Image: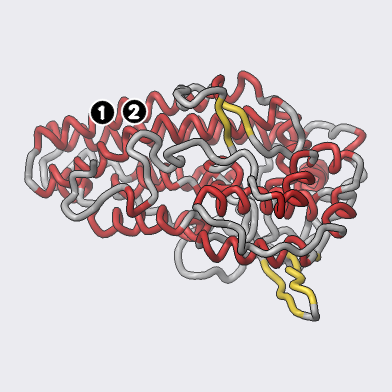
Amino acid sequence: MLNTPGVSFEQYALSLQNGFLPESPPLQQLSDPYYLPWESIVSDLPARIKNRAIRQAVNEMPILNTSKLGSEPEWRRAYSVLAYLTHAYIWGGDVPSEVLPPPISRPFLEVSKHLELPPCATYAALNLWNFKVSQDDTDLTDPDNLFVINSFTATKDEEWFFVLSVALEAKGAQLISLMTNAIQAASADDAALVKSHLDQLSDGLVELGELLERMYEHCQPAAFYHQLRPFLAGSKNMAAAGLPRGVYYDMGEGEGEWRQHSGGSNAQSSLIQTFDIFLGVVHHATGEAKGSDGKPPVVSKGGFIEQMRNYMPGPHRRFLEMMVRTANIRSYALSYKAGSPVRDAYNEAVMSLGRFRDKHVRMVTRYIIRPARATPPSETSSQLNLATTTSTRMESWNGQGVTDGVHGTGGTDLIPFLKQTRDTTKAAACYSD
């Protein structure tokens, strides 16, 4: 399956067919009636959010434990459900809630520990483990074939936003074994095979870019920005949005702790990080938003991209760690002179990844920067969340091309971070000796 000696996809919870997506479609519901209180609320989540009834419903839930969760698909389903309930509870009112009650906090921390994930809405909860298909043999690379299980808004815009990422993961799955095989080919000094794999990777990245641009088909910028995006926000760097200390995870009986977590972000896609690691692209951008004094806060070691690995399922994170240890393509390519077939193939693969990020920057401008400058819908004007605070900032700056201070759901200073990441990618190409 994986040609690297002593390594198999299974140990990293990877699928040869689906990559970082599960081998079989995720569970749509926990079968044990014990968990019906969770499932009944999440199945009606959009209506409860709209009616401002989500917090009361959660507060009235019994505190369930995880003893009846058996298989990994069950643990993943529980994680996705609790992630949706968490962010709906925090952001589902006129002002965010600083306290997460025991009916969510206690089981969510147990489930998160099992899956080696933080207790928040990660890319895994929102995308990898939150899609369904009409039939088992469905082509997952076509977003038209996919649907979401959980939803904050019940809109096509939200569904399309998430299933497109699922399709990208499925489309990119074929490139994972291509990269691991290229590493082995470089170790064996098979220049022709390395070049061939790099050429195929470049073509694959072009196809991923074309698929990414299908976002515009069914996801409207205003709907994404004002309806969905506020629920994706985390509790880190969200002081302006009403969470100066993060969120207090109340465990009951006088126990609990304050936590700050990034929200759901495509930086948490193990697939995208695999491309960087394989090509030897090293990102140093911290992504940290500036404080009220205009200075970036003190951050932990490693840039934002590396920190996002903590928001990936444990096995996927370990796959990336294995790739870091074994990746040799950049050094191998640079051992050949500029203009040689291997060096040219490497440079083209790097630039293909850079062009993919160009598309992402343009998309963020369309879906976040432009809506932030536009007049918000009247029904959202009284709320305090990531959308309203960003729009207020843009209004105070008169929208004169200002993008600094626009925070991503992961807590980053969004546009500067994305542009630096894109530029770092392209800078990895080397056209001279």
Tell me which corner region of the image, top left, top right, bottom left or bottom right, holds residue 425: top left
Circle 1 packing at 10 Å, graded few (<14), some (14-19), many (20+), is some
Residue contact between numbered discs 1 and 2, judged by CB atoms under 8 Å: yes
Circle 2 packing at 10 Å, graded few (<14), some (14-19), many (20+), is some
Depth order, front residue of 342/338: 342
> Dot 1: what SS?
helix
In the displayed structure, 43 sits above or below 320; it is above
Q: Which residue is mark 2?
A: 204
- Residue 34 got which mark? none
Q: Position of residue 84 (x, y in %)?
A: 70, 48
Q: Amino acid at mark 1?
A: Gln
Q: How many marks?
A: 2
Q: From the image, which quarter does the C terminus lie in?
A: top left
Residue at the image position 79 percent from the left and 31 percent from the top: 374
Q: For the residues marked 1 and 2, what is the alpha-carbon distance in whole angstroms?
A: 6 Å
Q: Position of residue 151 (x, y in %)?
A: 71, 37
Q: Which residue is mark 1?
A: 200
Residue at the image position 62 percent from the left and 48 percent from the top: 80
Residue at the image position 9 percent from the left and 33 percent from the top: 192
Identity of the residue furthest to the bottom in this view: 254
Q: Amino acid at mark 2?
A: Gly
Residue at the image position 50 percent from the left and 53 percent from the top: 71
In the displayed structure, 265 sits above or below 215; it is below
- Apparent side of residue 65 relative to residue 173 in the rendered image (left or right): right
In this orientation, does residue 405 appear?
Answer: no
In the displayed structure, 15 sits above or below 58; it is above
In this orientation, does residue 382 appear?
Answer: yes
